[in-house]
Image (spheres, grey):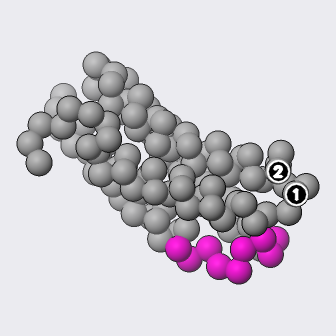
Amino acid sequence: MGRILHFRQLEAWRESHQLVLMVYQVTKGFPGDERFGLVSQMRRAAVSVSANVAEGFKRRGIQDKIRFYNVSEGSLEELKYFFILSKDLGYIPSNDDLMTQAETVGRLLNGLIASTERRR
């Protein structure tokens, strides 16, 4: 691919953005009383993954970049818990697709952090 000039070129961002879209779609069917509870938390955590990748990409210092990518990883783990909770509460019949996408994003974030660390 050559030199990456925009965060949109990062596979980690593209896949995390797909995860955001999946979360927004699935939470549309949650009960109305969860609008300001679990729905809000899930959406914010999902957006945080992508947003921190984007912000980290633009940071100039390697340590600064890695810190934002680590925040993405933390938000992703939080989101995985929300997938488990949503299934256990009966809001979704299965969390398999969400978890699979989350695992993909996690692997990509891990690779992004490792490649960034190698640039030190």
74 vs 26, left or right, is: left
Establish if 114 lies above or below 91.
above
Q: At 34% from the left edge and 22% from the top edge, which residue is drawn?
A: 59
Establish if 64 lies above or below 1.
above
Residue 49 in the image, given as x and y percentages of width and height = 50, 44
Q: Residue furthest left?
A: 2
Q: Residues within 10 Å of mark 2 (few under 14, many from 20)?
A: few
Residue 92 in the image, given as x and y percentages of width and height = 72, 74
Q: Can the viewer see residue 63 in this picture?
A: no
Label 2, label 1: how far apart the Cα atoms are:
5 Å
Q: Residue furthest right?
A: 33
Q: Which residues are magenta?
A: 89-97
Mark 2 in CB contact with mark 1 (< 8 angstroms): yes
Residue 71 in the image, given as x and y percentages of width and height = 50, 37
44 vs 1, left or right, is: right
Q: Is residue 27 magenta?
A: no
Q: At 56% from the left edge and 77% from the top edge, which residue is drawn?
A: 96
The dominant secondary structure in magenta is loop
Q: Amino acid at mark 2?
A: Arg
Circle 1 residue = 32
Circle 2 residue = 35
Q: How many numbered dots are placed on residues in this image?
A: 2
Establish if 42 lies above or below 25.
above
Q: Amino acid at mark 1?
A: Gly
